[in-house]
Image (spheres, helix red, strand yellow):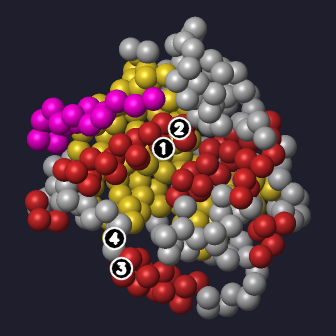
């Protein structure tokens, strides 16, 4: 349920499953950062459609995400789904007539009466026509010097072990070791959990949410499983093509992550970790 509290202020109520694929192995352990994002995104789309005239079939292309997990553990001794509340502030649009084109939202998530984390999103809404035009332009630039069919191998890569990336099941592992001896660099697997075998709604790029998951897994692997990945600050500079090999790497000497396709960087991130139970 969405309630408008002010001109650009909203509260949203919902439920988190107790045992969710985005939770830690311990049902009472930390929620995954992606559950925070999914919750904020769904609430944001509803708010944008109801209150900012977002056309229902427009794509929301994420441009920037910042997630912090201030208190990720769930309240103990709660059976069944966990009630959650969201406090959402929307940056005042520059022009009311175009308020849905560029939206920035800051969402505070609460569960069990405790503030659990914050998600900041900035996205660009676009029609199918604009999306197709942008993808044609990107493909033209990308295909110079490329090799036909080189992306097919992304669906036959051997995954890392689930524990290495903070997952419980092999089918959810998005990273595979690259060819050659290169540390802190991984190939992206597009067949993980069957989630990316089919383009959705005419969109042929790798979803930003999957890239975010790959970045979180890479951060976990880079930390050698010694800490919980407690924050990500991610910027997207374009759409990631499905048919081009995708590499996720940690920049040496820091906490910066990159998603690259050939010589092009499609996303960059800075991660924060904290001691505690892993994902």
Height in image: 187 above or below 70?
A: below
Q: Residue at x 76, y 36 (%)?
A: 168
Disc 3 from disc 2: Cα separation = 29 Å
Which of the pair 166/178 is nearer the observer?
166
Kind of element beneath mark 3: helix
Residue 207 as seen in the image, left or right of residue 51: right
Give x and y (percent) for residue 133: 41, 85
Judging by the rendered image, the residue that carries numbered circle 1 is 38
Give x and y (percent) for residue 233: 48, 45
Height in image: 177 above or below 106?
A: below
Judging by the rendered image, the residue that carries numbered circle 3 is 130
Kind of element beneath mark 4: strand
Height in image: 2 above or below 263?
A: above
Disc 3 from disc 4: Cα separation = 6 Å
Q: Which mark is residue 126?
A: 4
Q: Residues within 10 Å of mark 4 (few under 14, many from 20)?
A: some
The image quarter containing residue 177 is bottom right
Pointer 1 or 4: first along the chain: 1
Give x and y (percent) for residue 139: 55, 85
Give x and y (percent) for residue 55: 27, 65
Pointer 4 or 2: first along the chain: 2
């Amino acid at each position: 349920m969405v309630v408008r509290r002010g001109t650009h202020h909203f509260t949203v109520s919902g439920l988190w499953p107790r045992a969710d694929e985005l939770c830690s192995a311990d049902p009472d352990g930390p929620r995954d950062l992606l559950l925070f994002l999914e919750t904020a995104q769904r609430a944001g789309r509803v708010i944008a459609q109801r209150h900012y005239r977002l056309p229902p079939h427009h794509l929301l292309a994420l441009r920037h995400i910042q997630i912090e997990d201030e208190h990720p553990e769930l309240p103990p001794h709660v059976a069944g789904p966990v009630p959650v509340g969201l406090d959402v502030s929307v940056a005042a649009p520059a022009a009311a007539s175009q308020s849905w084109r560029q939206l920035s939202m800051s969402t505070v998530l609460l569960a069990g009466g405790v503030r659990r984390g914050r998600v900041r999103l900035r996205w660009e809404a676009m029609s199918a026509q604009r999306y197709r035009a942008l993808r044609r332009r990107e493909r033209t630039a990308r295909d110079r010097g490329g090799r036909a069919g080189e992306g097919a191998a992304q669906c036959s890569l051997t995954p890392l072990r689930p524990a290495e990336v903070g997952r419980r099941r092999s089918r959810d592992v998005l990273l595979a070791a690259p060819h050659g001896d290169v540390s802190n660099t991984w190939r992206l697997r597009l067949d993980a959990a069957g989630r990316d075998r089919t383009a959705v709604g005419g969109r042929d790029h790798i979803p930003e949410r999957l890239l975010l998951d790959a970045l979180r897994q890479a951060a976990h692997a880079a930390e050698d499983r010694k800490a919980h990945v407690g924050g990500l600050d991610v910027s997207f500079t374009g759409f990631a093509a499905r048919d081009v090999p995708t590499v996720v790497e940690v920049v040496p000497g820091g906490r910066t992550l990159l998603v690259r396709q050939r010589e092009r960087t499609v996303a960059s991130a800075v991660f924060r970790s904290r001691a505690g139970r892993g994902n």
